[in-house]
Image (cartoon, rainbow, N blue to C red):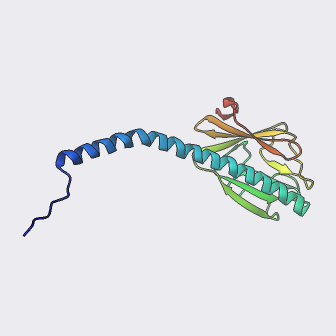
Amino acid sequence: MRSRPQNAFTLPETLIALTIAAIVLAFATPALSALLQQDRHTTEINQMHASLNYARGQAIQTRTMVSLCAGDDNCRDSRAWHGRILIFLDANRNGQLDEDEQLLKIVDIHPRHRWNWANFRQKSHMSFRPDGTTHSLNGTFTLCDKGIAIRGVVINITGRTMVNKSPDNDRCRG
């Protein structure tokens, strides 16, 4: 009777393979973490673009003022947006979600991020007129992550947006 050769790893071979795997994992973990963080930032930027385009489209389609603000159920009087963004038909044009106005959409902001809204009229909300133009002239939404400016979404009076890849860090302090 012939004995079969055994196919197995020895203990030293197994330990060497595990050591190499641990070293590779130690180098890959920070890179993966940075990649995931960058992906979250890109998602937030794209979400803000989509929210602004949606609000502008609804204003044009319904021929009504459409506003965006930060808040859970009602608009907060703050230009530092965190938690949620409310998009609503603003029939009385006051920038506040009133009981008789229709809430169109709620957008969640990642808990570690906030948007700082800076505009010439110093308003805490953003509105689109029925023709798709803004009420705020020009303005910038700056994405902040732990007090650091990541990117800005610049909006002009016509309602068009573009990404500012080197925003001012001063907009995220405080």
Residue lying at the far front in this picture: please name it: 2
Residue in front for this viewpoint, 2 or 83: 2
Identify the image quadrant of residue 141. Answer: top right
Residue in front for this viewpoint, 160 or 32: 32
**Residue in the image at 64% along x and 39% along y:** 144
**Residue in the image at 17% along x and 50% along y:** 10
The x and y percentages for residue 12 are 19, 44
Visible residue check, residue 90: no
The x and y percentages for residue 89 are 83, 60
Residue 162 sits above or below residue 53 on the image: above
Residue lying at the far left in this picture: please name it: 1
Which quadrant of the rendered structure holds the N terminus?
bottom left
**Residue in the image at 84% along x and 50% along y:** 127
Residue 47 sits above or below residue 23 on the image: below
Query: What is the total number of numbered labels drawn onto the structure image?
Result: 0
The x and y percentages for residue 44 are 65, 48
Residue in front for this viewpoint, 33 or 133: 33
The x and y percentages for residue 167 are 70, 33
**Residue in the image at 87% along x and 58% along y:** 59
Which quadrant of the rendered structure holds the C terminus?
top right
On the picture, is 58 further left or further right than 117? Answer: right
